[in-house]
Image (spheres, coloured by chain):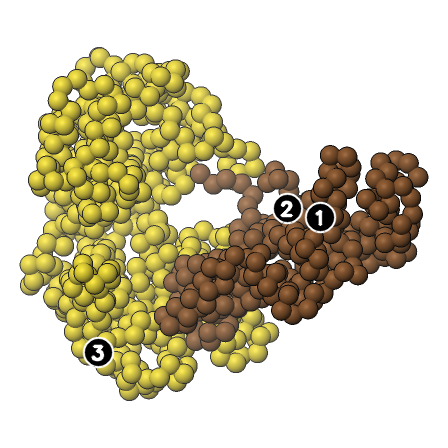
Chain colours: A yellow, B brown
Amino acid sequence: MTAAAPLLDIRGLTVELPPGGDRRHAIEDLWLRVESGRTLCVVGESGSGKSLAAAAIVRLMPSPRLRISGGQVLLDGRDTLAMGMSELLAVRGGRVGYVFQDPLSCLNPLERIGRQVREVLDRHGWAGDRAARVNRLLADVGLPQPGQIVHKYPWQLSGGQRQRVMIAMALAADPALLIADEPTAALDVTTQAQILRLLREQQAQRGLGLLLITHDFGVVAEMADEVAVLKDGRLVEHGDRAQVLGRPREAYTRRLLAAVPPLLARAARTGGQPLLQATGLRKTWAATGPWWRRGAPTPAVAGVDLRVDRGETVAVVGESGSGKSTLARLLARLTQADGGKASLQGIAEDYLSMPARQLGPLRRAVQMVFQDPFASLNPRHTVGHSVAMGPIACGTPRDQALREARELLERVRVDPRAADRYPSEFSGGQRQRIVIARALAMRARLLIADEPVSALDVSVQAEILDLLEEIQQRDGVGMVFITHDLRVAARMADRIMVMNRGEIVESGNAAAVLAAPAHPYTRELLLAVPRMEGASGCAPPHDTATGGA
Amino acid sequence: MNALPVNWRLWIGACTLTAIALVALGAPWLAPHDPWALLGPPLAPPGGEFALGTDLLGRDLLSGLIHGARVSLLIGLASTVCALAIGITLGAVAGYFGGLADRVVVRFTEFFQVIPAFLFAILLVAIMRPGLRSVIVAVALVTWPPVARLVRSEFLTLRSREFVEAARALGLGHGQIILREILPNALPPVIAVGSLMVATAILTESSLSFLGLADPNLISWGYIIGSSRSVFRDAWWLSVLPGLCLFVTVLSISLLADGLGDSRNPLLRSRRGLSP
């Protein structure tokens, strides 16, 4: 770009928080530029103000209590912050297209896809054949048979297809700037790769300026021309991709990059005694709906064998719908298996068929850590009580259990004085620590962690993974680690099992699976993981830096 | 109402309700006259010899209101407590256990819901024997089904939440999970519905006593409204003043319930600032 004004020029944007918060500004003095045909990635952890910055460009503030108090947002040289409402409405969806994180909640469930895309054209007074344009757009974003898709409802599409529809809507009125706020955070890794490719293609075809908000450095490495790192509403670092990922200037950026686990298996530990042995696990979900249009029953877990030794971590990886969470629940006996056997050494020979009232010892020995740290603690109990609850149920005197709960909180590095507070006063990472303390309180021998870090920021994620590992080594706990994230699996696992459609398609030592995947599905998964080699925190020292894409 | 801090609502509600309850308890000493005594000219307007005027038969309205508070409060609270007890128990069992228990409870609930509530109440009172106790039982029996349905739906969503699963994984029994884990989280909407049920109960009692099916020896706000309905255009105070009593009572119960619910809700208690 030459001396001409850039497409988007954010000059000193400041957004004020309502008084009484932990900081005064949600965004403070932010300067950013996006040129046509270029991609700016804004990265940061939750609470960094990155989504808000994107929303403020077209004044889509999520709450009236947030006030833009300074700066300019120049779009084609005109300040959107000073625009009248009618002019602004023409910009939204017209000059600026917006793609949100969760395509399910952003599409109207009661309207057909065609009408929703067409609405954008109607709104912006598209001249020409609108129906043809809708079909064209849907074809452009790679949806098969657009003529049929237009008649479907959002819930009839998959997550990836819905995100494609969202992109079609954002592109409908031929915008010059596309803002995508975590467009792939809710998608599987293979779908993510497809959507990112689609965004790049559309950008190249239309010469779009792309502002991509993300927390994922893998996405940054794939997509960015320039990178801006935000922390607590302030711009920490800004530069081109090679510089920010390869030679970050700021300590904060380096810390974020270092927290991304490399896609390399760590040294496997030598096996201990076998702890859990499960064979032929099966679970089929009965078909739902009235009898005249009831589908076939869905096999969620179809004959899975699994062995976990003491002190060993077995990672089960797979995409959503692969049955990995069902497997976790079968092993914890939260869901009744249809078939198969599972024995826990020293506890039960075959606990899947034991009557419910004999499960006491098993309940103590097998504990779960769930994905959503906000849902897995009872909001009405103090955290001390939540941790002590299990031992109390098993007959430990109340005072003793509460005292031990404080010690456990200290062990997971939560201030034990906070035992009398409620979960709502803790951050996601702290809550996950509390959940781990709750599992420890039962002196669990087998820990089943179902996506324990996928709801957490990358730096918090690293802390929780460290904590899990430390506990495991100290107590010799066996762990089944369910995850969709191959980097996390590589970081944690001694052995990796790859699950697809209810079956284990590949299993073996983590190093072997990652280095030489035997099954095509494993290869596909590995290929879809955004490459980060070349980034300073991730690359093994001897690896040649290959850059992104 | 949401603008008031939690504690204000709690205190206003609690104080007003306590005052009403004290008046009800002290009725024989507080009331200037016997509420049934024919003392003065019929339909005397407020402000004369009788502070709040007299009714059709020349009975003192103020004394009627004070004595009426007893029956109205008692019936309103007692029947609501009974209805909540039935509704919460059945709803919790249905929502938590699901399957056969759920189907049985839902059918049972529907059985009660298809009968028009007021007719059913009349029938029940007529079968039992008109009186205070039979009115309470009848009102409770016709008002519990919505509570059961509400509690059931709350339990249905809460039972699959992860903290409940975690409690199962910790080896807690069904009773503990229902009472300690799920019920506290299911209560807020139930409390809201319950506070309105008190009003419905008081009004149902008034309808029953209007038909002569309540205890004929007890005066209540509903009885006063019912008996003076026909002279509303000549003597507004006979309907409006007991109506106001009813309104203030229901409002204070509602404030108290709201305040209680919120003060026990850690989500609200800890809300200090907005995190971006």
Quadrant housing residue A221:
top left
Q: Looking at the rendering, in which quadrant would you find the C terminus of chain A?
A: top left
The answer for which chain carries disc 1 is B
Height in image: A385 above or below B231? below
Distance (Cα) linking label 2 and label 1: 36 Å
The answer for which chain carries disc 3 is A
Residue that carries the numbered disc 2 in the rendered image: B6
Q: The residue under label 2 is which amino acid type?
A: Val
Does any portion of residue A186 appear in the rendered image? yes
Residue that carries the numbered disc 1 in the rendered image: B226
For residue A382, the mark is: none
Q: Residue at x 55, y 45 (%)?
A: B271
Q: Looking at the rendering, in which quadrant would you find the N terminus of chain A?
A: top left
Residue that carries the numbered disc 3 in the rendered image: A339
* Crowd class of label 1 (few under 14; some 14 to 19; many from 20; radius 10 Å): some
Does any portion of residue A33 appear in the rendered image? no
x and y percentages locating residue A302 in the rendered image:
16, 70
